[in-house]
Image (tube, grey):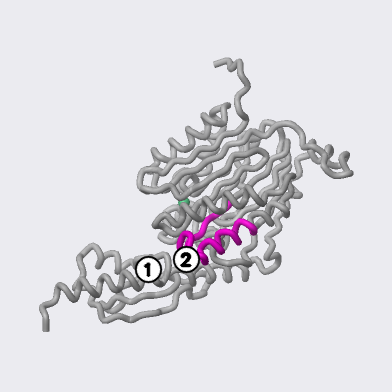
């Protein structure tokens, strides 16, 4: 179709997918600001966390694309989510990812926390602009997992950094000098968990209209199973960056040169990258809990099952006398694997329910 009217050069779309009843993702498309947030915590808490994060980001975003300033806005959004949880809006243990981009001409500033992603399609080649803060991403970097194995790993949804649990959370910040004709994609793991990068690249490059490309990506993730909420933002890169600072000439020069070598990464934890990831994993883990069958009894742990980079991520809290065999077969099977709960209170509540079930099933003494 030869479009007489100018089409938008960006589009955003979200879909709950086929399995989840709620959509815990949120996004904003408000040029020059674009962002995706993927809420965690269940029971509607994830929706609250991602919505608060996006709203706070919009409030705190800098006027001009600048990675460190954008990272500060992400930290401000974190503070809002932490405070909301503390004040009982939403739930303790709720959190969210946040991947934000500001686009000025061909210049892109990015700030990022969690396992949502930013990609750039350039000359038919798809490049990941962000690094996932997830347990499986760290295992891939350590050579312990392949991408394909990570896709099926039981801990694939465990993220090592998120908004909502730690006032001192830090955001990664990047800047990218793209070229006209490139295409920026922001997405939640409901997209990149269902499609390979090759599939994403093919679909993203197949439709000239960003809104058609966004729809096609969401549809492909649904066709692949749609196991999670899916959010995509597609932005066509064009034009030139306005020179803001006195050094306008250098900004012009930057606009014409692709500077992949200068792709900046302020992993603000700096040299403590590895230690930071461990610490972050521990900090995330401490807010969680799970129940598991241990020697035929239900045991409650605080943390997440398993160890990460040699560090135990869980601490035994309650060794109950509830016999696993007295519970229904589905619960027994789930307990064998471990049943994750958002926090310790929820895990103790579940244990109380099991105890009551066992008591009512047993004959009175
Ligand atoms: Ca998700």
- As drawn, 72 above or below 311: above
Q: Secondary structure at mark 1?
A: helix
Q: Residue at x 83, y 37 (%)?
A: 252
Q: Nearer the viewer, residue 188 or 272?
A: 188
Q: Residue at x 33, y 77 (%)?
A: 299
- As drawn, 292 above or below 235: below
94 in the magenta segment: yes
Horizontal arrangement in the rendering, residue 80 relative to residue 64 (left or right) = left
Q: Which of the marked residues, 1 or 2, is nearer the chain's N terminus?
A: 2
Residue 143 seen by the camera: no
Q: Nearer the viewer, residue 19 or 357?
A: 357
Dot 2 alpha-carbon crowd within 10 angstroms: few under 14, some 14 to 19, many 20 or more: many
Q: CA distance from mark 1 to mark 2?
A: 10 Å
Residue under circle 2? 92
347 in the magenta segment: no
Is label 2's Cβ within 8 Å of ligand 1?
A: no
Location of residue 227 in the rendering, given as x and y in whole percent from the top left corner: 39, 47
Mark carried by residue 281? none
Q: Residue at x 67, y 51 (%)?
A: 60
Q: Nearer the viewer, residue 86 or 204?
A: 86
Q: Secondary structure at mark 2?
A: loop
Q: Residue at x 30, y 68 (%)?
A: 335
Please state the extent of the stretch shown in magenta in the rendering.
75-98
């Amino acid at each position: 179709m030869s479009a007489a009217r100018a089409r938008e050069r960006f589009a955003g779309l979200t879909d709950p997918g086929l399995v989840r009843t709620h959509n815990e993702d949120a996004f904003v498309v408000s040029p020059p600001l674009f962002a995706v947030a993927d809420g965690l915590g269940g029971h509607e808490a994830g929706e609250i966390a991602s919505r608060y994060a996006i709203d706070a980001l919009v409030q705190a975003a800098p006027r001009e694309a600048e990675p460190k300033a954008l990272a500060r806005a992400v930290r401000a959004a974190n503070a809002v989510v932490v405070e909301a949880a503390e004040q009982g809006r939403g739930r303790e243990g709720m959190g969210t990812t946040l991947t934000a981009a500001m686009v000025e001409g061909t210049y892109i500033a990015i700030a990022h926390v969690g396992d949502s992603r930013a990609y750039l399609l350039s000359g038919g080649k798809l490049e990941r602009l962000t690094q996932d803060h997830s347990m499986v991403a760290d295992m891939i970097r350590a050579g312990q997992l392949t991408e394909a194995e990570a896709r099926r790993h039981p801990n694939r949804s465990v993220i090592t950094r998120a908004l909502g649990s730690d006032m001192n959370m830090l955001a990664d910040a990047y800047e990218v000098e793209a070229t006209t004709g490139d295409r920026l994609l922001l997405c939640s793991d409901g997209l990149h968990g269902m499609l390979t990068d090759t599939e994403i690249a093919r679909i993203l490059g197949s439709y000239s209209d960003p809104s058609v490309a966004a729809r096609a990506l969401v549809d492909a993730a649904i066709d692949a199973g749609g196991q999670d909420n899916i959010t995509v933002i597609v932005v066509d890169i064009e034009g030139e960056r306005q020179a803001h600072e006195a050094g306008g000439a250098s900004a012009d020069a930057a606009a014409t040169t692709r500077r992949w070598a200068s792709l900046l990464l302020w992993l603000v934890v700096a040299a403590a990258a590895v230690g930071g990831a461990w610490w972050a994993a521990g900090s995330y883990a401490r807010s969680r809990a799970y129940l598991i069958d241990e020697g035929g009894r239900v045991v409650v742990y605080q943390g997440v099952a398993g160890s990460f980079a040699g560090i135990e991520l869980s601490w035994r809290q309650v060794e109950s006398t509830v016999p696993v065999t007295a519970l229904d077969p589905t619960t027994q099977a789930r307990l064998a694997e471990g049943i994750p709960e958002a926090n310790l209170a929820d895990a103790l509540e579940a244990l109380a329910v099991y105890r009551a079930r066992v008591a009512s099933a047993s004959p009175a003494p």
